[in-house]
Each structure stands twice: as C-alpha cells, then as structure tokens.
Amino acid sequence: MTFDAPAGTESPPEAAVEPDENTQATTESAEPPAPADEVIGVRTGMFGVKGTGDTSGYGRLVRTINMPGSTPPPYGPVFDEIIAHLRLALAKGFEEAIEKIVVFRGELTLHVRREHLVRVAKTLRDNEALRFELCLGVSGAHYPEDTGRELHALYHLNSITHNRRVRLEVSAPDADPHIPSLYSVYPTNDWHERETYDFFGILFDGHPSLTRIAMPDDWRGHPQRKDYPLGGIPVEYKGARIPPPDERRSYS
C-alpha cells in the first residue's frame, strides 16, 4: 500500500533552502580554525633512546615535534572581547608585548615577550574590563629543539569577577634563562616560581628568595629538564645533617 503526499506539501531540496539569520549567526560563532602547527624539530625512535639494538621496529619511527601556531581572528566571542580590551589598555604597546595569540583546545594563550611580562600581567589584573585577579601558579616546560626559546614558563590566570581564564606563556633561551618574576603582581607565585626554578633552571628576576624548594641546596642540575639523565644519578646529599633552627637558612 502506498500513500501519495498531498499536493504542495513537498519540501524544497536542501540546496534551495535559504539560510536564515539564526543559521548565519550560528555559522559565524563557530569555533575558530585550528592554527597551523609550528614544526620545531624531528624525533626518531621511541622515547629518544638511541643505540640500543632495538628490533621492535620503533627505531625507525619518525615524528615531527609541533607547537601550535598563531591563530587567525576571530577567536570566539569571549576571547575576542578579552583581546579587544587588552589591546585597548596596552595601546601601541600591544604588538610589542604580544608575540602571538593561540586558541587551542578551548584555551586562549597569549605568548608574551619576557621584557613585557610584568606590564601585561598588571594590565590583566587591574583593568576593570579584564580583572584577572588570581594567578593559579607557574609551571615550566623544556623544549631542547626550540632553538632560542628552549625554556617556557606558563601562567594560568583566573578572573573571579568575569569567570574567565587565560594562559600566559613566556620563553627564554637556554643560554639566558632569565624571566621577570611576577611576585610583585601575584604574591602567590612565590613558591611556584621557586619550584619552577628548582626543576627547570629558570631564573625569575626580582624574586625575593629564589632558592630550591624540593631538591637540596647543593644539588646539581634541574631534574625535569629533557637533557637531565634518566638514571644513574649519584647521591648528592652532602653531610646528611639537619641543622638546629637557629642555623637554618632564612626565607625572609
């Protein structure tokens, strides 16, 4: 048994349907295009191990080492608003301070040139339209293949007022591992910067007491760097004695 559709009730073909304003708005507010990756090196084998006589086939594995590239605008409604307010607050200094803008996996990252870090952080904290009052800490990253910017410091900022987040990323060369401290802007970074120094060797200029926080004072090297040996580290605890309280180092 078959049923014929009443006359005049056929739906027009999809190609002939005109998009309405709501459809256009949805299309325009879609996620920004993925940034083109920035290739910083090529890695062969598994885990970077060489000369082991590997017969598993992993020895011939070749992979590129990629960093997210700069994202073209628009970045998305909320991210566009943050960038617009920051650009207005920094005025002509915006292009000098911000190296690139990356939207990756739903996060906005501002790559800041290190000499402008403190100014950008103060603007993000104090500007009424931005108000990123809280820094959740700083962590380090080491990319030996990223020539001239091997060491990276990453800050996660949170706006309690506007319920938004943004990441700041700053790089420094291995030969000059200096980055301005944000202790004066976000005092909660005190121990976070000490930990990043301890494990990655980044020197935070202006920190009130940049000493090791996990490893002994006389420990050589920084254990979370990619060039740190994976094993066979000799025990480097010297003396193995805990001094009395009045002889311990002061952090004030």
Image: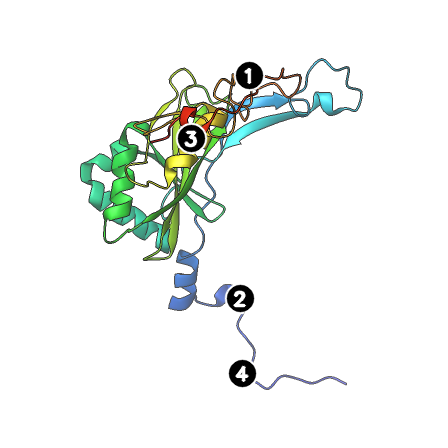
Residue linked to disc 3: 194
Mark with earlier residue (2, 3): 2
Is there any visible trace of residue 44 in the rendered image?
yes
Q: Where is residue 52 in the image (x, y as percent from the top left)?
A: 74, 15
Quarter of the figure with the C terminus: top left
Q: Distance between the residues labelled 4 and 2?
A: 17 Å
Check disc 1: other Cα within 10 Å, few if <14, some if 14-19, many if 20+.
few
Residue drawn at (41%, 27%) of the image: 246
- Asked if 19 appears above or below 163 in the picture, the reply is below
Residue linked to disc 4: 8
Mark with earlier residue (2, 1): 2
Residue linked to disc 2: 14
When asked about the image quadrant of residue 109, the answer is top left
Q: Looking at the image, which is closer to me, 176 or 31? A: 176
Circle 1: residue type? Gly
- Asked if 204 appears above or below 159 in the picture, the reply is above
Q: Where is residue 118 in the image (x, y as percent from the top left)?
A: 28, 35
Label 3: element kind: helix
Circle 2: residue type? Glu
Q: How far apart are marks 2 and 3 (CA)?
A: 61 Å
Circle 4: residue type? Gly
Q: Looking at the image, which is closer to me, 179 or 244? A: 244
Residue linked to disc 1: 239
Q: Where is residue 4 in the image (x, y as percent from the top left)?
A: 66, 84
Mark with earlier residue (3, 4): 4
